[in-house]
Amino acid sequence: MSGFVITFIPREQQKSEYDWVNLIFNDSNVGKARCLINGYNFTVFSINIYPEHKGKGFGKAFIEVVKNKYKIITADRVRNVAIGFWENVGFVKDGESGNWIFINGAT
């Protein structure tokens, strides 16, 4: 998606236990995500697209950027209403944990 960028705000910078990501489109903040980065592993706890920007593909664009950078991406404790989103971006259920996972290079 042309004009879409993400900026990471490390937990150390904000004195938080999470890494936050700003989702920006054409210089406007369209949402944010609460994550945890550990080497090549990336865990998503929430993706919040602001109401006026919902349904425009920004959540999917965020996940595509992350998939290009990290080896293992986990969607933590996915709610039933969000399962379709995670399936559509290529994630699979990780056992009975409620998590969904994407592994780059998996066959």
Image (cartoon, rainbow, N blue to C red):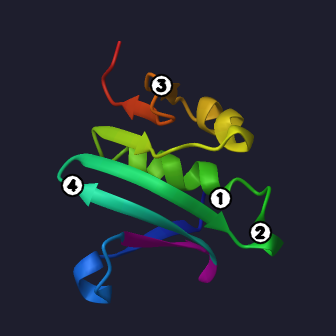
- Secondary structure mostly seen in magenta is strand
Pick out the residue farthest to the bottom.
Answer: 14
Q: Which-is-in-front pick, marks 4 and 2? A: 4
Mark 1–mark 2 CB contact (< 8 Å) = yes
| Dot 1 amino acid type | Phe
- Residue at point 27%, 38% (across, down): 71
| Dot 3 amino acid type | Glu
Q: Which residue is mark 2?
A: 53
Q: Which residue is mark 3?
A: 96
Q: What label does residue 58 carry, if any?
A: 1
Circle 2 packing at 10 Å, graded few (<14), some (14-19), many (20+), is some
Distance from the alpha carbon under mark 1 to that under mark 2: 8 Å
Residue 12 colored magenta? no
Tell me which corner region of the image, top left, top right, bottom left or bottom right, holds residue 7. Answer: bottom left
Circle 3 packing at 10 Å, graded few (<14), some (14-19), many (20+), is few
Q: Which-is-in-front pick, marks 3 and 1? A: 3
- Residue at point 32%, 87% (across, down): 14
Q: Nearer the viewer, residue 106 or 43?
A: 43
**Where in the figure is residue 66, as x and y percent of width and height?**
41, 50
Which quadrant does the C terminus fall into?
A: top left
Q: Which-is-in-front pick, marks 4 and 1? A: 4
Q: Which residue is mark 4?
A: 38
Pick out the residue farthest to the front.
Answer: 96
